[in-house]
């Protein structure tokens, strides 16, 4: 709530102040107020509803993605009015929170799932910026190309949501995917530095591709591990083994009252009552 409130408050200040001389004061002031207000609202809502962590992360994900997509539409239309950008960011943020909540209602995403989706979204945006960089070298209209990263980031989110269903990544697995992906991107930047290339597409593309490969390899390994574990658990539930152990010490006194001299050993043993019973059903 505090993080999103900081951005939404700044957007509200930009929508109100626009191009005025003191616009930065409004942006800073409303961002502080928004962070405090939305943080308190989120805190009290969580106390009342106790929303799952996966739902919170999905709301955060779309709460950040949707405003950026909304602003990219304005940039495509050559809009240079800061008031409209502020309204677009604010409206996109509110829409993103609603979208994230509705998406999480259709499937119970874990926090690890949300982390994997967010990292894939960032990688997809990087691939979109790679295409933009290549197009800019061909003197294409930069404003018309802004929608490419927005579109690829949305596609990455959708693909990620479908991929994680049934996997149930843990918090540790999700963070591992994020860290390994970021590490691969840094290695990609190192390769770019060694190659000493001036091509924007190469500079953005190599880290993005390496991050994508690492993300998919890490995710596939965790997916196979979790699916195998789920199969073992379902197999145990299918057989439904039950074990019981009962002790009846009072049978000792009952057995002592049986006159052993009247019966043969075989008959006498069959008349004995058991001191304990073990039962296994499957």
Image: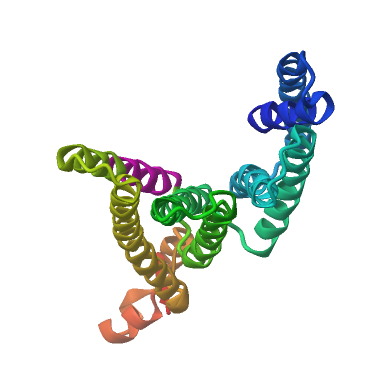
**Colour mode of the rendering:** rainbow
The reply, left or right, for residue 93 in relation to residue 243 is right
Residue 95, visible in the rendered structure = yes
The reply, left or right, for residue 18 in relation to residue 252 is right
Q: How many marks?
A: 0
Residue 177 highlighted magenta (yes or no): yes
Q: Which residues are magenta?
A: 171-183
Q: Nearer the viewer, residue 96 or 175?
A: 96
The reply, left or right, for residue 228 in relation to residue 113 is left
Residue 80 location (% of width, % of height):
71, 38
Q: Residue at x 68, y 47 (%)?
A: 78
Residue 268 lies, with reference to residue 161, above or below; the image says: below
Residue 181 highlighted magenta (yes or no): yes
Where on the picture, by quarter, is residue 3? top right
Quarter of the figure with the C terminus = bottom left
Residue 182 location (% of width, % of height):
34, 41
Magenta highlight: main SS: helix
Q: Residue at x 72, y 58 (%)?
A: 102
Where on the picture, by quarter, is residue 11? top right
- Residue lying farthest front? 139
The reply, left or right, for residue 89 in relation to residue 155 is right
Residue 266 location (% of width, % of height):
28, 85
Residue 273, visible in the rendered structure = no
Q: Nearer the viewer, residue 63 or 240?
A: 63
Q: Residue at x 26, y 82 (%)?
A: 265
Residue 109 location (% of width, % of height):
57, 56
């Amino acid at each position: 709530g505090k993080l999103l409130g900081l951005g939404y408050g700044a957007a509200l200040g930009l929508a109100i102040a626009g191009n005025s001389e003191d616009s930065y004061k409004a942006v800073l002031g409303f961002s502080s107020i928004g962070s405090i207000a939305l943080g308190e609202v989120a805190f009290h809502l969580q106390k009342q509803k106790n929303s799952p962590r996966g739902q919170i992360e999905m709301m955060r994900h779309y709460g950040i993605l949707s405003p950026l997509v909304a602003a990219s539409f304005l940039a495509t239309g050559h809009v240079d009015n800061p008031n409209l950008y502020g309204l677009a960011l604010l409206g996109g943020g509110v829409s993103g929170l609603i979208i994230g909540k509705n998406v999480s209602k259709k499937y119970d995403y874990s926090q690890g799932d949300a982390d994997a989706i967010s990292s894939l979204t960032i990688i997809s945006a990087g691939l979109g910026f790679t295409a933009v960089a290549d197009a800019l070298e061909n003197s294409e209209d930069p404003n018309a190309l802004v929608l490419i990263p927005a579109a690829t980031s949305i596609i990455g989110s959708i693909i990620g949501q479908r991929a994680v269903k049934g996997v149930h990544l843990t918090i540790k697995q999700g963070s591992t995917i994020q860290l390994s992906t970021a590490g691969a991107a840094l290695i990609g930047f190192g390769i770019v530095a060694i190659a000493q290339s001036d091509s924007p597409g190469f500079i953005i593309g190599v880290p993005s591709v390496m991050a994508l490969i690492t993300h998919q390899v890490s995710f596939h390994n965790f997916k196979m591990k979790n699916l195998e574990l789920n199969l073992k658990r379902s197999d145990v539930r299918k057989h439904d083994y039950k074990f019981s152990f009962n002790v009846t010490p009072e049978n000792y006194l009952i057995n002592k009252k049986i006159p052993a001299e009247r019966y043969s050993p075989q008959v006498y043993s069959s008349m004995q009552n058991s001191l304990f019973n073990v039962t296994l059903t499957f």
